[in-house]
Image (cartoon, coloured by chain):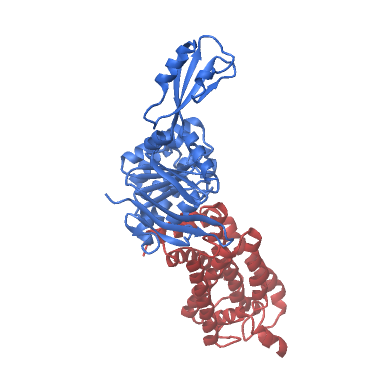
Chain colours: A red, B blue
Amino acid sequence: MNLHAIRAIYRFEMNRTGRTLLQSVLAPVLSTTLYFVVFGAAIGSRIDEIGGVSYGAFIVPGLVMLSLLTQSVTNAAFGIYFPKFTGTIYELLSAPVSFLEIVIAYVGAAATKSILLGVIILMTATLFVPLRIAHPGWMIAFLVLTAVTFSLFGFIIGIWADGFEKLQIVPLLIITPLTFLGGSFYSIDMLPPFWQKVTLLNPVVYLISGFRWSFYGIADVSVAVSLSMTALFMVICLLAIWWIFRTGWRLKS
Amino acid sequence: MPPVLSLAHVSKTYDSGFQALKDVSLEIERGEIFALLGPNGAGKTTLIGIICGIVKASSGTVTVDGQDVVADYRAARAKIGLVPQELATDAFESVWATVSFSRGLFGKPRNPAHIEKVLRDLSLYDKRDAKIITLSGGMKRRLLIAKALAHEPEVLFLDEPTAGVDVELRRDMWRLVRALRETGVTVILTTHYIEEAEEMADRVGVINKGEIVLVEEKHELMRKLGRKELTLYLHDPIEAIPEALAGYDLELSQDRCALVYTFDTQRERTGITALLQDLSNAGIHFRDIETRESSLEEIFVSLVKEET
């Protein structure tokens, strides 16, 4: 294992975050705070409790997931796309590193950034709503598993993308709508029966449901199903990345 | 001593069907400076890409110091440094950080003393904290060399190292390459500047249309294929070359004041003695004489022309 290479890439990526602190950390924190102000305080005060949890507190796991998913995808996608864009990918491809080491470094850095952001958002939430975490161990497990899985997904997006537009398409047009429609701001029990069934086709439902369960012990779907779905998505992403490096798709001539 | 780099029957056909390399076999000796010459699209960059792991070969094997670049890619790649043709850099990184990054990427532990030495050798140490975006083109070129040297490679590839740099910097670069060779580094460079190959290379390889046309020790190549010109500056202008001299490969200059005789250095008799005798017999006298050897560029052009 080329640990020096993993460390070098990881540090490089984390330094990039440091250089773009405003964009990387403050912007998502600000937008999440606005969600709390609008949905939690202004509108939420007029909405009843859901499963014994105030609306403001109910949306916290969904908001954390919203940031976690979009940031994981964006960070990882940008991390591997940028060397392709600048041409510095030659160095990575000619270095004595395996695909596993490259993935560990890039995905590790992207997931670290997302997790840090998730923690900051949680801390920000405590300023607005009373927060309790029923299963802290599971909460951390869901946080890490989701960040890693969607960072893997973002890594694939970054390799697939051949322009900045494609880089933005998936987070903006797929992840964000799926998260909004995946129960970030409501329980799927509140939907008509037909739309409840349709919503179950949305993989983000399982992530938000499991994550919310770790906070309040209430879930739209069983925790085992949530975990299984996340793990399945992770395995699919890993297989896709393995294939990419084996064939050199979009990386090598 | 076994070659440091060995290519056997390497071919590359892209998905589009374009065959960039055709059954290329080549051996590079340890510690030499090898210049790979070829016109645009000849396959130079593809060849380097295959050796460095950036391009997948369709067939054939490549070994670096005995290590296969596919089966033993870690060991093989750790011995190689690559300076690409394009000035590809991370604009917002500092010089020190990006060179340190390259060392780590190639599996070497931190060594600030080595990084400092490399930067000093390349006159970049004063710029160590500067962001890459603030560097001039020449400095960026040197920075890419610093990055390639950060992990102490045994083989250094320079893909068009002096493209777009001024004459002074080009000469600095040549000095640097020679200094690297002194430390035992094998240098393989591709270049459009024939002068560069002529100035630096020990051996020259010519590639055209994906095939190695020729590999030869530089001086031997010039000796074998080089032609010399003997220019005789006449005392008085002449109207035409006399019939008596028709058997010689002679040209009369436009001002009719000089005769240029082209001869093959390989032939046992160059014909100069006989020519001078015949000129004297024809009553043509000369006031000065000059000889000129073919440049590598002329040899290269003639080789590529022959192929086409």
Give the residue at the far left of this rendering. Answer: B1
Q: Can I make out residue A11 in this image?
A: no
Front residue of A87/B19: it is: B19
Which residue lies at the image location 70% right of the left edge and 70% below the top edge? A38
Left or right: residue A167 versus residue A109 is: right
Residue A32 at x, y percent in the picture: 63, 67
Residue A17 at x, y percent in the picture: 52, 57
Give the residue at the far front of this rendering. Answer: B244
Which residue lies at the image location 48% right of the left edge and 10% below the top edge? B285
B43 versus B238 height, above or below: below
Front residue of B188/B167: it is: B188
Q: Quadrant of the C terminus of chain B?
A: top right
B271 versus A15 height, above or below: above
Residue A105 at x, y percent in the picture: 45, 63
Residue B144 at x, y percent in the picture: 46, 45
Which residue lies at the image location 50% right of the left edge and 77% below the top edge? A235
Front residue of A110/A43: it is: A110
Determine which quarter of the picture holds residue A50: bottom right
Which residue lies at the image location 49% right of the left edge and 13% below the top edge? B282
Q: Can I make out residue A217 in this image?
A: yes
Image mark count: 0
Front residue of B277/A173: it is: B277
Determine which quarter of the picture holds residue B23: bottom left
